[in-house]
Amino acid sequence: MVSGPLQTSAHQPPANVRLTEHHAHLYEYGRSLTMVDASTVESAEALLDALADAVASSERAGRSCTRAFAARPEAWSSPEWPSLADLDRVTGKRPCCVWCFDYHAMLANTTALMLAGITASTPDPNGGVIGRDASGALTGVVYERCAGDVWNAMPDDGDAQRRRDTINAAKRFAGPFDEIHDLRSQIWLGSVLKAACETQGVDKRFVLYPLVDELDLALEGSRGWACDQVRLGGGKIFVDGTLNSRTAWMTRDYTDPMAGHPRGVAMMTPDAIEEAVRRCDEAGLPIAAHAIGDAAVRAVLDAIENVNPKTTGHRIEHAEVVDEADVPRFAKLGVTCSVQPCHLLYDIEAIRRFLPDRAARVLPLRELIDAGCKPGELLLFGSDAPIVRPDPADSLQAAIERRRVGMDESEAIAPDQAISFNEALECYLAR
Ligand SMILES: [Zn+2]
Protein backbone atom coordinates (compact mmCIF):
# COMPACT_ATOMS: atom_id res chain seq x y z
CA MET A 1 0.00 0.00 0.00
CA VAL A 2 1.36 3.43 -0.98
CA SER A 3 1.13 6.02 1.79
CA GLY A 4 3.05 8.96 3.16
CA PRO A 5 3.40 12.39 1.59
CA LEU A 6 2.28 12.71 -2.02
CA GLN A 7 4.96 13.31 -4.60
CA THR A 8 4.68 16.40 -6.74
CA SER A 9 3.02 15.92 -10.09
CA ALA A 10 4.76 16.69 -13.38
CA HIS A 11 1.46 18.21 -14.56
CA GLN A 12 2.01 21.80 -13.38
CA PRO A 13 -0.08 24.78 -14.47
CA PRO A 14 1.98 27.20 -16.62
CA ALA A 15 3.58 29.95 -14.48
CA ASN A 16 1.77 32.80 -16.28
CA VAL A 17 -1.84 31.64 -15.83
CA ARG A 18 -4.13 32.84 -13.03
CA LEU A 19 -6.39 30.30 -11.34
CA THR A 20 -9.53 30.11 -9.23
CA GLU A 21 -9.70 27.80 -6.20
CA HIS A 22 -13.36 26.79 -6.48
CA HIS A 23 -13.67 24.99 -3.14
CA ALA A 24 -11.79 25.81 0.05
CA HIS A 25 -12.39 26.54 3.73
CA LEU A 26 -10.34 29.62 4.55
CA TYR A 27 -10.67 29.83 8.34
CA GLU A 28 -10.25 26.07 8.76
CA TYR A 29 -7.19 26.17 6.50
CA GLY A 30 -5.71 28.96 8.61
CA ARG A 31 -6.44 27.10 11.83
CA SER A 32 -5.02 23.86 10.45
CA LEU A 33 -1.69 25.68 10.13
CA THR A 34 -1.66 25.90 13.97
CA MET A 35 -2.78 22.31 14.70
CA VAL A 36 -0.89 19.01 15.05
CA ASP A 37 -0.41 17.70 11.50
CA ALA A 38 -1.09 13.94 11.67
CA SER A 39 -0.79 13.40 7.91
CA THR A 40 2.60 11.68 8.13
CA VAL A 41 1.63 9.43 11.08
CA GLU A 42 1.47 5.79 9.96
CA SER A 43 0.17 3.89 13.00
CA ALA A 44 -1.97 4.23 16.14
CA GLU A 45 1.20 4.17 18.28
CA ALA A 46 2.79 6.98 16.25
CA LEU A 47 -0.38 9.06 16.62
CA LEU A 48 -0.32 8.59 20.41
CA ASP A 49 3.37 9.62 20.52
CA ALA A 50 2.64 12.77 18.47
CA LEU A 51 -0.28 13.66 20.76
CA ALA A 52 1.80 13.14 23.91
CA ASP A 53 4.37 15.64 22.55
CA ALA A 54 1.63 18.09 21.54
CA VAL A 55 -0.07 17.91 24.95
CA ALA A 56 3.22 18.73 26.65
CA SER A 57 3.96 21.67 24.35
CA SER A 58 0.41 23.09 24.48
CA GLU A 59 0.57 22.93 28.28
CA ARG A 60 3.79 24.95 28.15
CA ALA A 61 2.17 27.44 25.71
CA GLY A 62 -0.82 27.86 28.03
CA ARG A 63 -3.34 26.54 25.51
CA SER A 64 -6.37 24.78 26.97
CA CYS A 65 -6.70 21.87 24.54
CA THR A 66 -4.99 19.86 21.83
CA ARG A 67 -6.24 19.61 18.26
CA ALA A 68 -4.87 17.48 15.44
CA PHE A 69 -5.91 17.00 11.84
CA ALA A 70 -5.25 14.94 8.70
CA ALA A 71 -5.06 11.50 10.35
CA ARG A 72 -5.59 8.83 7.72
CA PRO A 73 -6.03 5.50 9.54
CA GLU A 74 -7.30 3.99 6.26
CA ALA A 75 -3.73 4.07 4.93
CA TRP A 76 -2.06 2.69 8.09
CA SER A 77 -0.75 -0.88 7.94
CA SER A 78 -3.24 -1.71 10.71
CA PRO A 79 -6.18 0.60 9.88
CA GLU A 80 -7.52 1.07 13.42
CA TRP A 81 -7.67 4.23 15.54
CA PRO A 82 -6.04 3.97 19.01
CA SER A 83 -8.41 2.84 21.76
CA LEU A 84 -10.16 5.45 23.90
CA ALA A 85 -8.32 4.15 27.00
CA ASP A 86 -4.93 4.64 25.29
CA LEU A 87 -5.92 8.12 24.10
CA ASP A 88 -7.04 9.12 27.60
CA ARG A 89 -3.79 7.75 29.01
CA VAL A 90 -1.61 10.09 26.87
CA THR A 91 -3.89 13.17 26.90
CA GLY A 92 -5.12 13.09 30.51
CA LYS A 93 -7.98 15.40 31.44
CA ARG A 94 -7.24 18.07 28.80
CA PRO A 95 -9.68 18.02 25.87
CA CYS A 96 -8.13 16.48 22.78
CA CYS A 97 -9.55 15.72 19.35
CA VAL A 98 -8.06 14.36 16.13
CA TRP A 99 -9.80 14.93 12.82
CA CYS A 100 -9.68 12.26 10.18
CA PHE A 101 -8.29 14.01 7.06
CA ASP A 102 -11.78 14.15 5.48
CA TYR A 103 -13.26 16.05 8.49
CA HIS A 104 -16.21 13.65 8.71
CA ALA A 105 -14.84 11.40 11.45
CA MET A 106 -12.95 12.30 14.62
CA LEU A 107 -11.18 10.60 17.50
CA ALA A 108 -11.90 12.40 20.79
CA ASN A 109 -10.81 11.73 24.36
CA THR A 110 -13.30 11.27 27.20
CA THR A 111 -13.02 14.92 28.33
CA ALA A 112 -13.81 16.20 24.81
CA LEU A 113 -16.71 13.74 24.44
CA MET A 114 -18.12 14.87 27.78
CA LEU A 115 -17.86 18.56 26.80
CA ALA A 116 -20.17 17.63 23.88
CA GLY A 117 -22.49 15.72 26.23
CA ILE A 118 -21.59 12.33 24.75
CA THR A 119 -21.53 9.31 27.08
CA ALA A 120 -22.09 5.57 26.50
CA SER A 121 -25.83 6.05 27.09
CA THR A 122 -26.20 8.88 24.51
CA PRO A 123 -28.27 7.68 21.51
CA ASP A 124 -27.04 8.48 17.96
CA PRO A 125 -28.63 11.78 16.90
CA ASN A 126 -30.04 12.37 13.39
CA GLY A 127 -27.14 12.82 10.97
CA GLY A 128 -24.55 11.63 13.47
CA VAL A 129 -23.00 8.37 14.66
CA ILE A 130 -21.27 7.64 17.97
CA GLY A 131 -18.72 4.82 17.58
CA ARG A 132 -19.21 1.90 19.98
CA ASP A 133 -17.61 -1.51 20.38
CA ALA A 134 -19.48 -4.83 20.53
CA SER A 135 -20.23 -4.31 24.24
CA GLY A 136 -21.68 -0.82 23.60
CA ALA A 137 -18.72 1.05 25.14
CA LEU A 138 -17.53 4.26 23.43
CA THR A 139 -14.58 3.87 21.02
CA GLY A 140 -13.86 7.62 21.04
CA VAL A 141 -14.56 7.81 17.27
CA VAL A 142 -17.52 10.00 16.30
CA TYR A 143 -18.91 10.69 12.85
CA GLU A 144 -20.57 13.54 10.96
CA ARG A 145 -22.79 15.70 13.20
CA CYS A 146 -21.32 14.16 16.38
CA ALA A 147 -17.79 15.07 15.24
CA GLY A 148 -19.02 18.62 14.61
CA ASP A 149 -20.61 18.68 18.09
CA VAL A 150 -17.34 17.67 19.76
CA TRP A 151 -15.40 20.20 17.68
CA ASN A 152 -17.82 23.00 18.60
CA ALA A 153 -17.64 22.05 22.29
CA MET A 154 -13.83 22.42 22.40
CA PRO A 155 -12.70 25.57 24.27
CA ASP A 156 -13.07 28.67 22.06
CA ASP A 157 -10.06 30.28 20.35
CA GLY A 158 -11.49 33.78 20.66
CA ASP A 159 -12.17 36.43 17.99
CA ALA A 160 -8.62 37.71 17.72
CA GLN A 161 -7.21 34.22 17.03
CA ARG A 162 -9.91 33.55 14.42
CA ARG A 163 -9.04 36.76 12.64
CA ARG A 164 -5.34 35.93 12.68
CA ASP A 165 -5.97 32.41 11.35
CA THR A 166 -8.22 33.66 8.53
CA ILE A 167 -5.85 36.41 7.41
CA ASN A 168 -2.95 33.96 7.57
CA ALA A 169 -4.95 31.60 5.31
CA ALA A 170 -5.78 34.36 2.82
CA LYS A 171 -2.08 35.22 2.62
CA ARG A 172 -0.89 31.61 2.42
CA PHE A 173 -3.21 31.00 -0.53
CA ALA A 174 -0.57 32.77 -2.55
CA GLY A 175 0.81 31.55 -5.85
CA PRO A 176 -1.44 31.17 -8.84
CA PHE A 177 -4.84 31.98 -7.27
CA ASP A 178 -6.72 35.18 -8.08
CA GLU A 179 -10.05 34.05 -6.65
CA ILE A 180 -10.98 31.71 -3.79
CA HIS A 181 -14.44 30.26 -3.12
CA ASP A 182 -15.21 29.50 0.53
CA LEU A 183 -17.75 26.69 0.80
CA ARG A 184 -19.05 26.97 4.34
CA SER A 185 -18.58 30.58 5.25
CA GLN A 186 -18.94 31.67 8.85
CA ILE A 187 -21.14 34.71 9.43
CA TRP A 188 -18.11 36.82 10.46
CA LEU A 189 -15.92 35.75 7.51
CA GLY A 190 -16.98 38.48 5.03
CA SER A 191 -16.05 41.38 7.29
CA VAL A 192 -12.71 39.80 8.28
CA LEU A 193 -11.81 39.26 4.60
CA LYS A 194 -12.87 42.77 3.63
CA ALA A 195 -10.62 44.16 6.36
CA ALA A 196 -7.76 41.86 5.20
CA CYS A 197 -8.10 43.28 1.66
CA GLU A 198 -8.25 46.88 2.88
CA THR A 199 -5.58 46.85 5.56
CA GLN A 200 -3.36 43.78 5.01
CA GLY A 201 -2.69 44.09 1.30
CA VAL A 202 -4.52 40.86 0.37
CA ASP A 203 -5.24 41.31 -3.34
CA LYS A 204 -7.51 38.39 -4.22
CA ARG A 205 -11.23 37.98 -4.75
CA PHE A 206 -13.34 35.88 -2.35
CA VAL A 207 -16.73 34.28 -3.01
CA LEU A 208 -18.63 33.15 0.09
CA TYR A 209 -21.18 30.35 0.52
CA PRO A 210 -22.70 30.42 4.03
CA LEU A 211 -25.07 27.65 5.16
CA VAL A 212 -28.59 28.01 3.74
CA ASP A 213 -29.84 28.02 7.35
CA GLU A 214 -27.82 31.22 7.91
CA LEU A 215 -28.56 32.82 4.54
CA ASP A 216 -30.87 35.56 5.88
CA LEU A 217 -28.24 36.58 8.42
CA ALA A 218 -25.51 36.49 5.74
CA LEU A 219 -27.58 38.59 3.32
CA GLU A 220 -28.10 41.20 6.00
CA GLY A 221 -24.42 41.16 7.01
CA SER A 222 -23.22 41.31 3.40
CA ARG A 223 -24.52 44.89 3.14
CA GLY A 224 -21.61 45.76 5.42
CA TRP A 225 -18.87 43.74 3.68
CA ALA A 226 -19.80 43.06 0.03
CA CYS A 227 -17.25 44.89 -2.16
CA ASP A 228 -15.22 44.42 -5.34
CA GLN A 229 -13.13 41.74 -3.68
CA VAL A 230 -15.63 39.93 -1.43
CA ARG A 231 -19.09 38.77 -2.49
CA LEU A 232 -21.86 36.36 -1.51
CA GLY A 233 -21.97 33.41 -3.94
CA GLY A 234 -24.90 31.28 -2.72
CA GLY A 235 -26.08 28.95 0.05
CA LYS A 236 -24.40 25.71 1.14
CA ILE A 237 -26.04 22.46 2.22
CA PHE A 238 -24.61 19.05 3.21
CA VAL A 239 -26.55 16.14 1.74
CA ASP A 240 -24.22 13.30 2.81
CA GLY A 241 -20.82 12.39 4.31
CA THR A 242 -17.65 11.01 2.66
CA LEU A 243 -16.37 7.82 1.03
CA ASN A 244 -13.58 7.33 3.58
CA SER A 245 -15.99 7.41 6.50
CA ARG A 246 -18.48 5.25 4.50
CA THR A 247 -21.03 7.99 5.13
CA ALA A 248 -21.38 9.08 1.48
CA TRP A 249 -24.98 8.30 0.46
CA MET A 250 -24.88 5.52 -2.15
CA THR A 251 -27.47 3.89 -4.41
CA ARG A 252 -25.95 0.49 -3.58
CA ASP A 253 -24.55 -1.16 -0.46
CA TYR A 254 -20.94 -0.63 0.55
CA THR A 255 -18.65 -3.62 0.76
CA ASP A 256 -17.93 -3.76 4.51
CA PRO A 257 -20.35 -0.90 5.47
CA MET A 258 -20.52 0.89 8.78
CA ALA A 259 -22.85 -1.06 11.12
CA GLY A 260 -26.46 -0.01 10.56
CA HIS A 261 -25.61 2.17 7.53
CA PRO A 262 -25.31 -0.12 4.48
CA ARG A 263 -25.61 2.76 1.99
CA GLY A 264 -24.05 5.55 4.05
CA VAL A 265 -25.84 8.47 5.68
CA ALA A 266 -28.40 10.76 4.03
CA MET A 267 -28.11 13.98 5.99
CA MET A 268 -31.17 15.63 4.38
CA THR A 269 -34.54 14.35 3.13
CA PRO A 270 -35.58 15.06 -0.49
CA ASP A 271 -38.14 17.57 0.84
CA ALA A 272 -35.49 19.40 2.86
CA ILE A 273 -33.19 19.62 -0.20
CA GLU A 274 -36.03 21.11 -2.29
CA GLU A 275 -36.82 23.56 0.49
CA ALA A 276 -33.17 24.68 0.56
CA VAL A 277 -33.13 25.18 -3.24
CA ARG A 278 -36.33 27.25 -2.91
CA ARG A 279 -34.90 29.41 -0.11
CA CYS A 280 -31.79 30.20 -2.16
CA ASP A 281 -33.91 30.93 -5.23
CA GLU A 282 -36.08 33.37 -3.26
CA ALA A 283 -32.89 35.17 -2.24
CA GLY A 284 -31.81 35.27 -5.92
CA LEU A 285 -28.83 32.99 -5.22
CA PRO A 286 -27.77 29.51 -6.37
CA ILE A 287 -27.28 26.55 -4.08
CA ALA A 288 -23.98 24.71 -3.56
CA ALA A 289 -24.78 21.18 -2.36
CA HIS A 290 -22.18 18.85 -0.82
CA ALA A 291 -23.04 15.48 -2.43
CA ILE A 292 -20.37 12.76 -2.68
CA GLY A 293 -22.27 9.46 -3.14
CA ASP A 294 -24.31 8.71 -6.26
CA ALA A 295 -27.60 8.73 -4.29
CA ALA A 296 -26.81 12.18 -2.87
CA VAL A 297 -25.89 13.53 -6.34
CA ARG A 298 -29.15 12.17 -7.74
CA ALA A 299 -31.19 13.63 -4.86
CA VAL A 300 -29.78 17.13 -5.54
CA LEU A 301 -30.38 16.88 -9.31
CA ASP A 302 -33.95 15.69 -8.56
CA ALA A 303 -34.55 18.63 -6.21
CA ILE A 304 -33.28 21.19 -8.74
CA GLU A 305 -35.36 19.58 -11.48
CA ASN A 306 -38.49 19.60 -9.28
CA VAL A 307 -38.09 23.17 -7.99
CA ASN A 308 -37.04 24.53 -11.41
CA PRO A 309 -35.38 27.64 -9.89
CA LYS A 310 -35.18 31.00 -11.71
CA THR A 311 -31.58 31.56 -10.61
CA THR A 312 -28.62 29.94 -12.38
CA GLY A 313 -25.21 28.81 -11.20
CA HIS A 314 -26.34 25.93 -8.97
CA ARG A 315 -23.45 23.68 -7.98
CA ILE A 316 -22.96 20.14 -6.77
CA GLU A 317 -19.78 19.97 -4.69
CA HIS A 318 -17.56 16.84 -4.89
CA ALA A 319 -19.84 14.54 -6.99
CA GLU A 320 -17.28 11.80 -6.40
CA VAL A 321 -19.52 8.95 -7.57
CA VAL A 322 -22.05 9.66 -10.35
CA ASP A 323 -24.39 7.08 -11.83
CA GLU A 324 -24.36 6.83 -15.64
CA ALA A 325 -28.03 7.87 -15.80
CA ASP A 326 -27.31 11.15 -13.98
CA VAL A 327 -24.30 12.29 -16.07
CA PRO A 328 -26.35 14.05 -18.84
CA ARG A 329 -28.60 15.73 -16.25
CA PHE A 330 -25.89 18.25 -15.22
CA ALA A 331 -25.76 19.98 -18.62
CA LYS A 332 -29.49 19.51 -19.19
CA LEU A 333 -30.36 21.26 -15.90
CA GLY A 334 -27.44 23.74 -16.12
CA VAL A 335 -25.97 22.43 -12.86
CA THR A 336 -22.24 22.96 -12.34
CA CYS A 337 -20.20 19.94 -11.28
CA SER A 338 -17.61 21.32 -8.82
CA VAL A 339 -15.11 18.52 -8.23
CA GLN A 340 -11.79 18.09 -6.41
CA PRO A 341 -9.99 15.40 -8.41
CA CYS A 342 -7.10 15.61 -5.91
CA HIS A 343 -9.32 13.66 -3.46
CA LEU A 344 -8.96 10.65 -5.74
CA LEU A 345 -5.25 10.52 -4.85
CA TYR A 346 -6.17 10.07 -1.18
CA ASP A 347 -9.30 7.94 -1.63
CA ILE A 348 -7.81 5.12 -3.75
CA GLU A 349 -7.57 2.69 -0.79
CA ALA A 350 -11.08 3.51 0.43
CA ILE A 351 -12.55 3.10 -3.07
CA ARG A 352 -10.91 -0.32 -3.50
CA ARG A 353 -11.98 -1.47 -0.06
CA PHE A 354 -15.51 -0.07 0.21
CA LEU A 355 -16.72 0.45 -3.38
CA PRO A 356 -14.94 -2.07 -5.62
CA ASP A 357 -18.10 -2.47 -7.75
CA ARG A 358 -18.53 1.29 -8.21
CA ALA A 359 -14.90 2.25 -8.92
CA ALA A 360 -15.76 2.75 -12.61
CA ARG A 361 -18.25 5.47 -11.59
CA VAL A 362 -15.73 7.58 -9.62
CA LEU A 363 -15.30 11.13 -11.03
CA PRO A 364 -16.58 10.42 -14.58
CA LEU A 365 -14.94 13.57 -15.98
CA ARG A 366 -14.64 12.30 -19.57
CA GLU A 367 -18.36 11.48 -19.68
CA LEU A 368 -19.35 14.78 -18.05
CA ILE A 369 -17.43 16.81 -20.64
CA ASP A 370 -18.73 14.68 -23.50
CA ALA A 371 -22.27 15.19 -22.12
CA GLY A 372 -21.93 18.99 -22.33
CA CYS A 373 -20.26 20.08 -19.06
CA LYS A 374 -17.87 22.65 -20.55
CA PRO A 375 -14.61 22.85 -18.52
CA GLY A 376 -14.46 26.12 -16.60
CA GLU A 377 -18.22 26.65 -16.88
CA LEU A 378 -20.13 23.53 -15.88
CA LEU A 379 -17.05 21.63 -14.69
CA LEU A 380 -14.87 23.33 -12.04
CA PHE A 381 -11.84 22.18 -10.03
CA GLY A 382 -10.80 22.96 -6.47
CA SER A 383 -8.92 21.35 -3.58
CA ASP A 384 -11.21 21.47 -0.50
CA ALA A 385 -8.23 22.74 1.56
CA PRO A 386 -7.52 22.02 4.39
CA ILE A 387 -8.94 18.54 3.67
CA VAL A 388 -6.00 18.21 1.28
CA ARG A 389 -3.27 20.66 0.31
CA PRO A 390 -4.34 23.41 -2.14
CA ASP A 391 -1.88 22.45 -4.89
CA PRO A 392 -3.56 22.59 -8.34
CA ALA A 393 -0.99 20.10 -9.67
CA ASP A 394 -2.62 17.37 -7.55
CA SER A 395 -6.00 17.79 -9.28
CA LEU A 396 -4.32 17.95 -12.70
CA GLN A 397 -2.46 14.72 -11.85
CA ALA A 398 -5.67 12.95 -10.77
CA ALA A 399 -7.76 14.18 -13.71
CA ILE A 400 -5.12 13.27 -16.32
CA GLU A 401 -3.50 10.14 -14.80
CA ARG A 402 -6.27 8.90 -12.45
CA ARG A 403 -3.58 7.72 -9.98
CA ARG A 404 -0.83 8.99 -7.67
CA VAL A 405 2.60 9.87 -9.00
CA GLY A 406 4.71 6.71 -9.07
CA MET A 407 1.77 4.28 -9.11
CA ASP A 408 1.57 1.68 -11.84
CA GLU A 409 -0.88 2.36 -14.69
CA SER A 410 -2.81 -0.75 -13.69
CA GLU A 411 -3.68 0.91 -10.37
CA ALA A 412 -5.52 3.86 -12.00
CA ILE A 413 -9.15 4.37 -10.93
CA ALA A 414 -11.54 4.47 -13.92
CA PRO A 415 -8.77 5.30 -16.46
CA ASP A 416 -11.41 5.69 -19.24
CA GLN A 417 -12.53 8.88 -17.47
CA ALA A 418 -9.15 10.64 -17.92
CA ILE A 419 -9.23 14.09 -19.55
CA SER A 420 -6.53 16.13 -21.32
CA PHE A 421 -4.15 18.63 -19.70
CA ASN A 422 -5.88 21.55 -21.45
CA GLU A 423 -9.34 20.40 -20.36
CA ALA A 424 -8.15 20.00 -16.75
CA LEU A 425 -6.43 23.40 -16.74
CA GLU A 426 -9.61 25.08 -18.08
CA CYS A 427 -11.46 23.81 -14.98
CA TYR A 428 -9.09 25.87 -12.80
CA LEU A 429 -8.76 29.06 -14.85
CA ALA A 430 -9.80 32.38 -13.32
CA ARG A 431 -12.50 34.17 -15.34
ZN1 LIG B 1 -15.52 21.36 1.56
Image: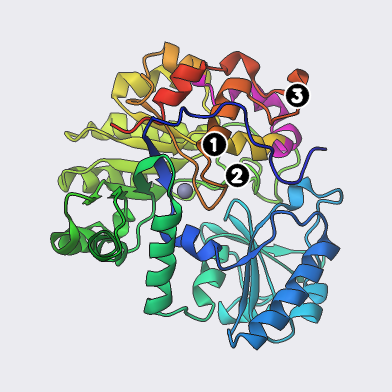
For marks 3 and 2, give the one nearer the viewer: 3
For marks 3 and 1, give the one nearer the viewer: 3
Please identify the quarter of the rendering in which residue 151 is found.
bottom right
Cα separation, mark 3 vs mark 2, equals: 25 Å
Q: What span is colored magenta in the figure?
A: 349-365
The residue that appears at 43% across and 16% down in the rendered structure is 369
Residue matched to label 3: 411
Residue matched to label 1: 293
Cα separation, mark 3 vs mark 1, equals: 22 Å
Specify which label sits upstream in the sequence, 3 or 2. 2
Q: Please tell me which residue lies in front, 201 or 419.
A: 201
**Picture coordinates of residue 399 (x, y %)?**
55, 25
Specify which label sits upstream in the sequence, 3 or 1. 1
Kind of residue indicated by mark 1: Gly
- Number of residues whose C-alpha sits closer than 10 Å to that of mark 1, classed few (under 14), some (14–19) or many (20 or more): many
Residue matched to label 2: 264
